[in-house]
Amino acid sequence: MLNWFGKSIWCDEDDNVVVLPRRCMNKLIRLAREYSPRECGSWLAGVYPDAKTCVISDVANVPVDSSHNHMSFCRGVSGFEIVGDSYVGEWHTHPSGTC
């Protein structure tokens, strides 16, 4: 991971890149701490400026109809709305994991 101008940047061995602004990373961390020790997650908004790059612009709150416990998470759909940028993916935590 590379930190560059307030963004976290990940690149894999195939040169696929994910750019995550610090404010989005901070929101992910806040949500993970809020729901810990249960798993949590939501969807991500952003853009693909090219075929190998994803730039995240927003992290949705955990939907209230999600089900989650210490070992599993099923994202709900309540409040699903992407305004502006497009849906680019999902995230979720594994607070009881070994990684």
Image: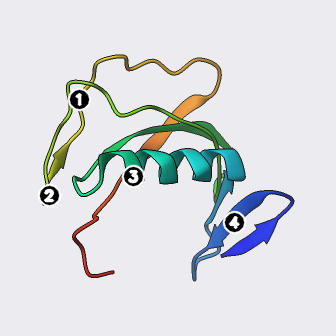
Residue 94, image x, y percentages: 28, 64
- Say which label, 4 or 2, has the lower sequence index: 4
- For the residues labelled 4 and 3, the Cα–Cα distance comes to 20 Å
Q: Amino acid at mark 2?
A: His
- For the residues labelled 2 and 3, the Cα–Cα distance comes to 12 Å
- Say which label, 2 or 3, has the lower sequence index: 3
**Count the marks: how many?**
4
Residue underneath mark 1? 76
Front tag of 1 and 2: 2
- Say which label, 3 or 1, has the lower sequence index: 3
- For the residues labelled 3 and 1, the Cα–Cα distance comes to 16 Å
Q: Check disc 2: other Cα within 10 Å, few if <14, some if 14-19, many if 20+.
A: some
Q: Check disc 4: other Cα within 10 Å, few if <14, some if 14-19, many if 20+.
A: some
Q: Amino acid at mark 1?
A: Gly
Q: Residue drawn at (68%, 45%), measured in percent from left and top?
A: 23
- Mark 4 near mark 1, Cβ–Cβ under 8 Å? no
- For the residues labelled 4 and 2, the Cα–Cα distance comes to 29 Å
Q: Nearer the viewer, residue 72 or 26?
A: 26
Is label 4 in a helix, a strand or a loop? strand
Residue underneath mark 2? 70
Using the image, tell me which numbered label, if any, was put on residue 9: 4
Using the image, tell me which numbered label, if any, was put on residue 32: 3
Q: Residue drawn at (27%, 23%), measured in percent from left and top?
A: 77
Is label 3 in a helix, a strand or a loop? helix
- Say which label, 4 or 1, has the lower sequence index: 4
Q: Left or right of 34: which side holds 67?
A: left
Q: Amino acid at mark 4?
A: Ile
Is label 1 in a helix, a strand or a loop? loop
Q: Residue drawn at (65%, 20%), measured in percent from left and top?
A: 84
Q: Amino acid at mark 3?
A: Ala
- Mark 1 near mark 2, Cβ–Cβ under 8 Å? no
